Image: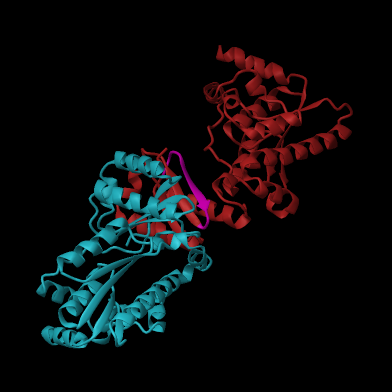
Chain colours: A cyan, B red
Amino acid sequence: MLMEKYQKLKDYFKGKKVIVSYSGGIDSSLVAKVSSDNAKYTLAITIDNGFFSEDAVNNAIERAKKYNINHKIIKMNYMDSEDIISKINNDLKNRCYFCKKFMAEELVKEKNKLSDNVINNDIIIVDGTNYDDLFEDRPGMRAYKEYNIKSPLAELKFSKNDIINISKYLNLDIPKKDTCLATRVLNPPITEEKLKMVERAERFLASFLNIEGYFRVRHFYDIAIIEINKDEVYKFETDIDNLKTINKKFKEIGFKKCVLDFNLK
Amino acid sequence: MLMEKYQKLKDYFKGKKVIVSYSGGIDSSLVAKVSSDNAKYTLAITIDNGFFSEDAVNNAIERAKKYNINHKIIKMNYMDSEDIISKINNDLKNRCYFCKKFMAEELVKEKNKLSDNVINNDIIIVDGTNYDDLFEDRPGMRAYKEYNIKSPLAELKFSKNDIINISKYLNLDIPKKDTCLATRVLNPPITEEKLKMVERAERFLASFLNIEGYFRVRHFYDIAIIEINKDEVYKFETDIDNLKTINKKFKEIGFKKCVLDFNLK
């Protein structure tokens, strides 16, 4: 059953020329790897838009090397573009839509550049959206659809579990989940400074308390709001001095207050 | 030594006609009581400006009755006066100054009304400011000074300890400290709704966790920030279900989030 799905995925890419929107996460890694091994031509593109941590971008580079994936990084820091960042800041609810739209435009530009070189222009662009994702409200997906970006994992009904199992079968490491830092900023504007603060705070906290599951540091009017799993909240509670240390560190990072959200995940 | 101070306080009021700015707290209760027992005439006035909890106002009424203090409540809800509340909201840092200024004006009006009746007009207005208060930055005190309101406890160098000891000597109960609800609102505007939310949240939390020491619920952009003593923070931690219950209750009250401040007092 799983092998049938895998075969369909390989068939999907056979004879094609493919650009993969590649983040280094488990989904787009699988797509990039299977395309690399089966398509006529594959280019995995990571758009470093300033919304992901340095760790996330480095992870994408390392995995591409490790799995022999033809890879290109495009730097287009949203914070450097008044036009882009103001669109996002003026309508924070739709930030994912705008973000993906700008990324899609960039991918299409790359496709057009390539088409000039590769004679025929039947290049497809694909991403890592899977079947489970379809049932969530993701405005970003809508943007990719508008630019005719395909989602083979969703089309072939790959669940997250299928993806984990086939990744294991192909000996692909399961990467740590990296998520967009911009979602940490609860009130506009999103700025480079706020993203850096959140990144530093999360990196510190993860190692200080050895947090393994879900956790986020949100930026809300200069306050850091920590969201944590109910199974790991005890890590804050073992020692009151921990709270003091965290509070001090977060103030050094630039937050005015550091608080714990009672809405445990 | 203490009895000497007490004697001086009694002498302070001898033969005078006195209006006491009276909140029902330990300081102004002592002033109102000693004035009642020694002055020619005493009227304790509580200005119910909407910034104190119902409990606080009721406490002032009950204590006045219990200790036989001539007492008057003046209702002047700041939230009903566009002029007053907009001055406070436009300059939240100086809210204590404006608040006391409006209260002082009201006390002076009352004094003038009384003067018509009591033939001569050598009435003094006093408050409960003590000697320790002088060393804190309290913009409210400045406003009272501008209206020539006297502070006998400060003038006679009564420390908080002196006040506690003389209150005990006079068999006056030590009341629970009630503080201004407006200080709970961290971002303007101060509204009746926000004050009610904070009042309900604090009342619930105090009884749910049986909190005895310092604690506050602050209102910050629809988030409830709980501040607690380091000696009582364990009360949140004994049971994860407590956090869920508190979170649910605070949402019912109208907060979007409920969080704990790591800056333990």
Query: B228 left or right of A26?
Result: right
Front one among A106 and B110: A106
Residue in the picture at 40% in, 64% down: A76
Residue B154 in sight: yes
Q: Examine the image and state in which quarter residue A14 appears.
A: bottom left
Q: Position of residue B120 (x, y in %)?
A: 88, 26
The range drawn in magenta is B211-222
Residue A176 in sight: no
Query: B191 left or right of A130?
Result: right
Q: Position of residue A90 (x, y in %)?
A: 53, 66
Q: Examine the image and state in which quarter residue A217 appears.
A: bottom left
Q: In which quarter of the image is the C terminus of chain A?
A: bottom left
Q: Examine the image and state in which quarter residue A41 appears.
A: bottom left
Q: Position of residue B149 (x, y in %)?
A: 73, 29
Q: Position of residue B104 (x, y in %)?
A: 74, 36
Residue in the picture at 27% in, 86% down: A155
Residue in the picture at 22% in, 75% down: A32
Residue B15 belongs to the span the image colors magenta: no
